[in-house]
């Protein structure tokens, strides 16, 4: 009898996200077991079950996915799960709170294809959410000088601190309260990543169309109003006002393939740990 591939979907929100359940199946799991309200304090028994229930040979067929809307909570849960493992009593784990790692990895992999980031200024607009923070981290990993904007300086600073703590990179926090101030924050930028909440416009077309340094731009927001006026949802590496632009659907296809590919890889061994760096590494091989 074939050993069933079981994916334990551990969500930090009260109700486990159905999107992650579906992609779990589409990525090759035979059965996805969603749990909501999981945190570092109550995860122990779930991890013990995964670690001990199967023989060494079969452990690779149990895996854990960590999701939820809050990246900091997901990161803490991911760390708590890893701490439980010892010797070969471990299973593969993937962290992707709110699609942060897969979305950021897929879109930055596209952007740097057109504009290698080393030494370039990259501005992550509204970069305080899960996607923006991970996009900032992978852009910094590529050697960019990364600016993170927020409507509130303290929130931009907090995101920069989290990135420093987790990845060791310095980012620059900038307060930008409206479209005009976000447009000003693009001065000298070659790469712009709009990571605002769904349905929120961050830039008017007039705020970016004449920017003479800007080379590539991505808007992750797929819900009208879109984040960047003038960039269409389906744009995929098309030229607009002399810049290469990507809309949310333009990156969405790779994001979905990447998410599925990561799930499939979890079942190839019992010690894979997929967070931003490795997921980004996989994305770069798929562009
Ligand atoms: P999020 O946490 O919901 O929001 C990101 C930031 O947007 C917030 O931290 C906030 O920053 C800012 N914001 C919220 N309301 C605002 C307003 N009225 N005006 C200006 N700024 C506002 O977003 P996320 O989960 O990181 O996701 C980012 C985007 O990616 C979303 O649009 C999401 O739908 C999209 N997404 C796309 C894909 C894809 O495949 N294309 C996949 C996943 C997610 P401050 O409060 O600090 O200003």
Image (cartoon, helix red, strand yellow):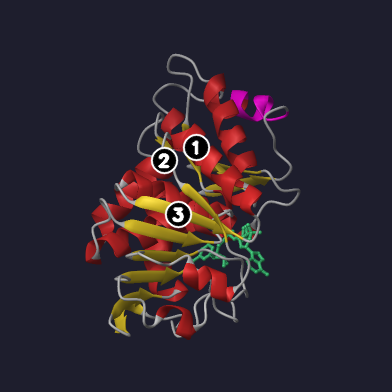
- How far apart in space, not on screen, are marks 3 and 2 (Cα)? 33 Å
Q: Residue at x 58, y 53 (%)?
A: 128
Q: Residue at x 76, y 48 (%)?
A: 14
Disc 2 Cβ-to-ligand 1 distance below 8 Å: no
Quadrant that contains the C terminus:
bottom left
Give the residue at mark 1.
63
Give the residue at mark 2.
266
Local SS, label 2 = helix
Dominant SS of magenta comes to: helix
Q: Which mark is residue 52?
A: none
The reply, left or right, for residue 228 in relation to residue 225 is left
- Give the magenta part as a residue range: 42-48
Residue placed most toward the observer, 157 or 25: 157
Give the residue at mark 3.
147
Other-residue count near label 2 (Cα within 10 Å), few / some / many at <14 / 14–19 / ≥20:
many
Other-residue count near label 1 (Cα within 10 Å), few / some / many at <14 / 14–19 / ≥20:
many
What is the x, y in percent for residue 167?
43, 36
Q: Quadrant of ligand 1?
A: bottom right
């Amino acid at each position: 009898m074939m050993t069933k591939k079981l994916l334990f979907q551990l969500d930090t929100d009260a109700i486990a996200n159905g999107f992650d359940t579906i992609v779990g199946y589409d990525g090759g799991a035979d059965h996805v077991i969603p749990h909501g309200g999981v945190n570092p304090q109550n995860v122990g028994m779930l991890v013990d079950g995964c670690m001990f229930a199967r023989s060494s040979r079969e452990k690779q067929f149990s895996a854990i996915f960590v999701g939820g809307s809050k990246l900091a909570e997901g990161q803490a849960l991911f760390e708590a799960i890893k701490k439980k493992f010892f010797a070969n009593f471990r299973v593969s784990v993937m962290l992707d709170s709110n699609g942060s790692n897969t979305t950021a990895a897929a879109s930055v992999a596209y952007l740097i294809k057109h504009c290698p980031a080393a030494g370039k200024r990259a501005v992550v607009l509204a970069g305080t959410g899960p996607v923006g923070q991970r996009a900032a981290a992978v852009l910094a990993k590529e050697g960019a000088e990364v600016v993170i904007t927020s409507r509130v300086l303290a929130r931009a600073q907090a995101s920069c601190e989290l990135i420093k703590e987790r990845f060791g990179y310095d980012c620059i926090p900038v307060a930008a309260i409206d479209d005009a101030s976000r447009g000003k924050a693009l001065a000298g930028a070659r790469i712009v990543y709009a990571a605002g909440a769904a349905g929120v416009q961050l830039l008017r077309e007039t705020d970016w169309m004449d920017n003479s340094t800007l080379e590539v731009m991505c808007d992750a927001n797929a819900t009208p109003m879109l984040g960047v006026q003038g960039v269409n949802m389906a744009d995929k590496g098309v030229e607009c006002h002399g810049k290469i632009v990507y809309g949310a659907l333009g990156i969405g296809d790779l994001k979905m393939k990447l998410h599925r590919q990561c799930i499939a890889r979890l079942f190839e061994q019992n010690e894979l740990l997929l967070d931003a760096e490795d997921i980004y590494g996989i994305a770069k091989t798929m562009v």
